[in-house]
Every structure is written in structure tokens, then in C-alpha cells.
Image: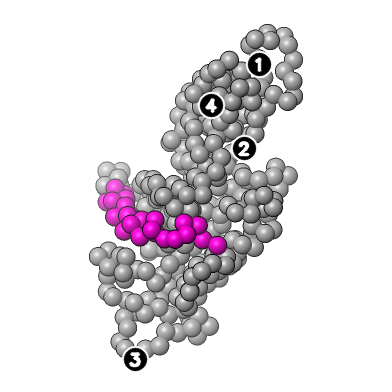
Amino acid sequence: MIYNQWYVVLESKELKRNHPVQVKRLNEKMVMWRDENEKACCIADKCCHRGASLSCGKIKDGRLECPFHGFIFDETGKVTLIPANGKNRIVPETMNVKSYKTCEEYGFIFVWWGDDDKRTAAPFFFSELRDFSYSSFKDHWHTHYSRAIENQLDVVHLPFIHRTTIGRGNKTLVNGPVVTLENDLLTFYVNNVEDDGKTIPLKPNEITDYQNLFHLQFHYPNIWQNFITDKIRAFAAFVPVDEENTIIYIRYYQRMIRIPLLKELFNYIGKISSIIILRQDKRIVVTQIPAKSEFSMDERLIMGDKPIVEYRRHRHHLMETNNPVSELS
């Protein structure tokens, strides 16, 4: 995973007041809860005293009580009370666990994974989606998050995996694609056409009007959107659980219909369609070997894989720039 980044880790609706939630994200077990002001809090899910899971505890006055011996933890991971020592005894500074800064926007909870002194003010999101309504669902994939991301950058697979849905038309020949990168935002422009047996695919530098083509965007480390139309978008957050598992949050965004009941129905239909398409991908992606992609690996890539090549290249660059030596994975 890429260090010093904001990661989507949970949808806001999954974190209720007065109910701590255990999550495994970024290969680490965490416990999340809401304080008295409804702010999302996140610390390591292991008591520094005897190693009990804090997520089995209770919320008391906005803080987390360990279920084993009643130690009270605040949002910084610091123990503020050791009941056995009494309320008047000062708690040693060593009584603490790792904490994670959080940010809650757009119905998602983000966690900062990295050094506090390098933390940016707020995570990136596709801010134009504020004007859209959406439906959502989540899916667990038994594969590394990099493979799940690359599937959404893969323009070659459409007429094969999705021949009954978005890949209809047998458009197997891939022109380009053109890929641009600006401030960690990877945009790729797609032009798949039917193969007449005579046409040679255009190279990326031979496509001069690419800005007018169908396009998709990925922003590091883990969010993506598909510009289906000006008023319809597909969105995904690829949440790393560990080296072998990923949670994908899919949202169907639209601003075509705003009448309440019709809007909900339209969004629901969009969600069902998204589930069908994603499950077509899942059936194959979870079989890929190895489960985690790397910048350099034993694959024979082709011109149509350019978005994947550029994703790997920049991901490798970010990891080399940001990650401690122990985290280069």
C-alpha cells in the first residue's frame, strides 16, 4: 500500500453511535467509534495493557472502554483512566495505542495512513458528485486491492467479460488508449471499435481528438469514477483489507431524476446493474496469479494495457517516495 495517503475505509452509515466497530484495513486491525460530537475516531484494536480487543468494549462519554479491565481510551489512543489505580492517579504516557486521523466527507470515512507531519488537510474526492444522488453497495474480493483497481483500468477485457452487458457489440480492437496524469489523477480515454480485419489500432500519439472520447478517472490511492454520461457516473472505492482481501464500495450516481420516489427507484435499478457488472469482473479477477500486482512482474502487456502500465508506474513512484523501507509492499 502507498504510505502517506488518505484511504476510504468505511461508509459513514456503517458507523453508528455507541457501537464500536472492528475493521481490518491496510493490513491492520482497527476499532472505530463516534464520540459525543459524532466525529469518527479510530485507534488500534489491541489494548496496551493485556492485548484484549477494544472493539468488544463500550462507549462511555464519547470514549472507548476496554472490556477486560475498564481502561478508557480517547481518540488519540491515550489511556485517560485506569480504574484499578483510581481516578486521581496520573496515567503514564506509555499507556497508549496507535491512533489514526480521520476525515468524513461524501458519506465516506477516510483514514490517514502515514506520518502526521505529512498529512494533507483533506482527502481528494470527485467534488462534482455533490450534485448527484446515489445508491451503493459493497463487495468483498479475495484479491489484493491493486488487482481490483487494475480491473477498472482494463479497456481490453470489455467485449469478453462483459459481452452480455457493457461489452456488447464485439468491439475488440483497442485504439490507444490515451492516458494522462496530473496531481495523482489518472485519466484514460477509451476508443474500442469492431475489428474489420483491415484496421490497425491507432497508437496513443495518433489520436488527436482524445478529449472527446469516453473516459474514466482514477485518483491515488483508491478511488475511481466512470463518466457514463454527463448525468450518470459509476464510482468505486477499493479498500485494502490485507495482502489478500479487498472491500469494494460501488456507487451509482445520477442527476437525471430528482423526484423522490422515482429517484430512489432509478438509483436502485442502477445499483442492480452495477452489481451484475462487478460480479462479472470478480469471477475472473480473483483467479489472477499472483494476487498482487507489481511494477515489474511476469506479464506480457500490450498497447491496450497502457492505463495499467501507467497506474503501476506511478504507484511504484509514490511508494518509493513515501513508504518506509519496511512498508514497500
Is label 2 in a helix, a strand or a loop? Answer: loop
Gap between marks 1 and 4, in whole Å? 17 Å
Disc 4 residue type (three-letter) = Ser
First reached walking from the N terminus: tag 3 or tag 2: 2
* Crowd around label 1: few <14 · some 14–19 · many ≥20 (10 Å): many
Q: What whole-number distance in Å separates the C-alpha atoms at marks 1 and 2?
A: 20 Å
Q: CA distance from mark 3 to mark 4?
A: 64 Å
Q: Main secondary structure of the magenta part?
A: helix
What residue is shown at x 38% (from left), y 64% (from top)?
Answer: 229
Q: Amino acid at mark 1?
A: Leu
Q: Which mark is residue 270?
A: none
Q: Disc 1 or 2, which lies upstream in sequence?
A: 1
Question: What residue is pinned by disc 1?
Answer: 81
Is residue 122 depicted above or below 156 in this figure? above
Mark linked to residue 53: 4
Q: Look at mark 3 in the image and give the residue it sits on.
A: 198
**Numbered mark located on residue 100 in the image:** 2
Within 10 Å of disc 4 (Cα), the crowding (few <14, some 14-19, many 20+) is some
Residue at mark 4 to residue at mark 2: CA–CA distance: 17 Å
Q: Earlier in the sequence, mark 3 or mark 4?
A: 4
**Span of residues in magenta:** 267-294
Query: What is the x, y in percent for residue 228?
Result: 38, 63
Q: Earlier in the sequence, mark 1 or mark 4?
A: 4
Residue 133 lies, with reference to residue 186, above or below; the image says: above
Give amino acid for label 3: Lys
First along the sequence among labels 4 and 2: 4
